[in-house]
Amino acid sequence: MKVFDAHIHFDKYTENHQKQIIKSLASHQVEGLITVSMNLSSCKENFRLASNHPYIFPAFGFHPEQPVPAETEVDELLKWISGHQEKMVAVGEVGLPYYLRLKDKSSCFQYEGYVEILEQFILLTMKLDKPIILHAVYEDARIVCDLLEKHNVKKAHFHWFKGDKKTMERMIENRYIVSFTPDIFYEEETREVVAFYPLDLTMAETDGPWPFDGIFQNKMTHPSMVHQVIQEVASIKKVTIEEVYATIFNQVKDFYGI
């Protein structure tokens, strides 16, 4: 059955790996890739890739797990995205720097700067009438939910989500989407989210080229791994594989307007 990889950094693969993946998508029944961007240069590369390959559906944004950009950089990126909105399916990947903040314990860490930038992307999302793809885990997810609710955002996708039950209940009430990676096979935290979160608000992703452990150790992260994620979702939720395939496939198409 057909699948989408709902979150991948396709521009971060080597050119040879990109070619290998593109050639193999049809044989693996992969209908398309939602490829997210890290910054302006990443946006431009994903735009180029999408222009050459019908399998690629790009999202444009600024990944938060990197130094906070200057105001002029943000303005340039927002302007570029607005000028290329016809090609993109979403604003993303954007969010808050949970892991970067863990590493940087200094009092001068500019967390509020990231919040301000995220709010600008949320405003852009509303202006362009596009979904938003979010990097927001644990306590960051609560702050992001505050911003989404403040601006009445309806179409939000939290990728590789981790968080507490209360936050998940809030996200479910707002009909926000979450997606799961191949770590579903060995991370109990992820498996607990799968069990709790409704299937009709679920997607599957790889976040490639991010590497995985367990049965995927030492393997290049390939969009076809989404099949295994879907099969494990079915196992955890104790529903048929056919139901999970159909629900998740249609979810991606409907959410991203593909």
Image (cartoon, rainbow, N blue to C red):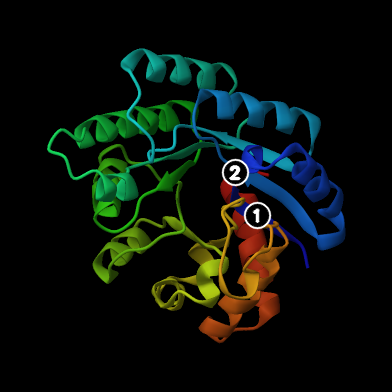
- The percent position of residue 143, horizontal first and vertical second, equals 24, 47
Q: Residue furthest left?
A: 107
Q: Nearer the viewer, residue 106 or 237?
A: 106
Q: Amino acid at mark 2?
A: His
Name the residue carrying label 2.
Answer: 9
- Nearer the camera: disc 1 or disc 2: 2
Task: Tell me the quarter of the picture where residue 247 sits.
Answer: bottom right
Say few, some or many: other residues with alpha carbon within 10 Å of mark 2 (under 14 / 14 to 19 / 20 or more): many
* Res 146 seen here: yes
Q: Residue furthest front?
A: 218
- The percent position of residue 150, horizontal first and vertical second, equals 25, 40
Q: Is residue 185 above or below residue 218?
A: below
* Res 86 seen here: no
Q: Is residue 210 above or below residue 100?
A: below
Element marked by disc 1: strand
In which quadrant will I find the N terminus?
Answer: bottom right
- The percent position of residue 238, horizontal first and vertical second, equals 56, 87
- The percent position of residue 2, horizontal first and vertical second, equals 76, 62
Q: Amino acid at mark 1?
A: Asp
Q: Which mark is residue 148?
A: none
In the picture, measured across the screen, residue 136 lies left or right of residue 109, that is: right
Name the residue carrying label 1.
Answer: 5
In which quadrant will I find the C terminus?
Answer: top right
Which residue appears at 38% of the width and 36% of the height? 66
Q: Is residue 188 above or below residue 98?
A: below
Which residue appears at 79% of the width and 41% of the height? 16
